[in-house]
Amino acid sequence: MSICNLPARLNLIFNDNPLSPCSDLEIIQLERQRGIKLPSTYKDFLKMMGHGAGKFLRGSDCFYQHLPQIQEWAKQLLVENDFPQALPEDAFVFFMHQGYQFSFFRLSEGDNPPTYSYCEGQEQPDFVKSHDQFSDFLSVEINLYLQSLMLIEGSAFNNIRGRASSTAFLVKRLGTRCGRDLSLS
């Protein structure tokens, strides 16, 4: 799936969330400053919502203003948790959530590269391949966001069953972000 296949779902999200895109010049400057060439699907993401997307991805550091810092934050998290591996040389950290989890792709793995993740407290000594493509990462985040909206709009917080559904959703989201199955079933 490419990022171009996501517009219908993107419209559902962004009717109520203003998009703030990066300019082509900002993307070129980022590539020059880092001495890298970004994958085309990631550039599409930056051109669509590189400076923000309202409530979508709120609480996560993944927008243009965070990019200079999150690579270092990810390295610090690995050191603080005595993780046995360093980030690969060609890793580009594009997402950090609440300081305990991050995702990256490898610049050498094409225009829609697989994504890998690390989550504080994970048992395995390797990075987890979390998605086959960057566009899959984005698609999962869109689906999680839409599910959270349906819970809120469906008065999920007004009854016990709704609270259980909300808790299950949040646990599933955490598991998805950490590359683990944390389902309650």
Image (cartoon, rainbow, N blue to C red):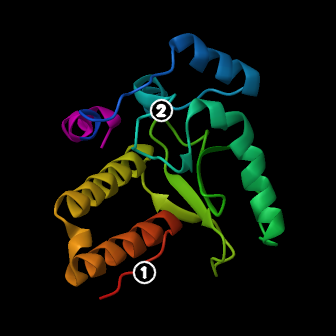
* 120 sits to left or right of 144: right
| Residue span colored magenta | 1-12
Across and down, in percent, residue 71 comes to 72, 45
Q: Which of marks 1 and 2 is nearer the N terminus?
A: 2
Find disc 1 in the rendering and name its residue: 182
**Helix, strand, or loop for circle 2?**
loop
Magenta part, dominant SS: helix
Give the image location of residue 162, x and y in percent: 23, 76
Image position of 95 with respect to 28: above or below: below
> Was residue 6 drawn as part of the magenta stretch in this picture?
yes
Residue drawn at x 20%, y 58% is 150
Place of residue 166 in the rendered image (x, y in percent of width and height, measured from the top left): 31, 72
Pair 1/2: label in front:
2
The quarter of the displayed image where residue 128 is located: bottom right
The answer to whether 26 is drawn above or below residue 80 in the figure is above
Instruction: Using the image, tell me which numbered label, if any, was put on residue 154.
Output: none
Q: Residue at 58% across / 11% down in the picture? A: 25
| SS at mark 1 in the image | loop
- Count of labels in the image: 2
Q: Which of 77 and 170 is in front in this view?
A: 170
Q: Residues within 10 Å of mark 1 (few under 14, many from 20)?
A: some
Residue at 72% x, 54% y: name it.
74
On the image, the x and y values in percent for residue 174 come to 47, 69
Instruction: Residue at the far bottom: name it.
Output: 185
Q: How far apart are marks 1 and 2 (CA)?
A: 29 Å
User: In the image shown, does 4 or 14 lie closer to the viewer?
Assistant: 14
Residue located beneath label 2 in the image: 52
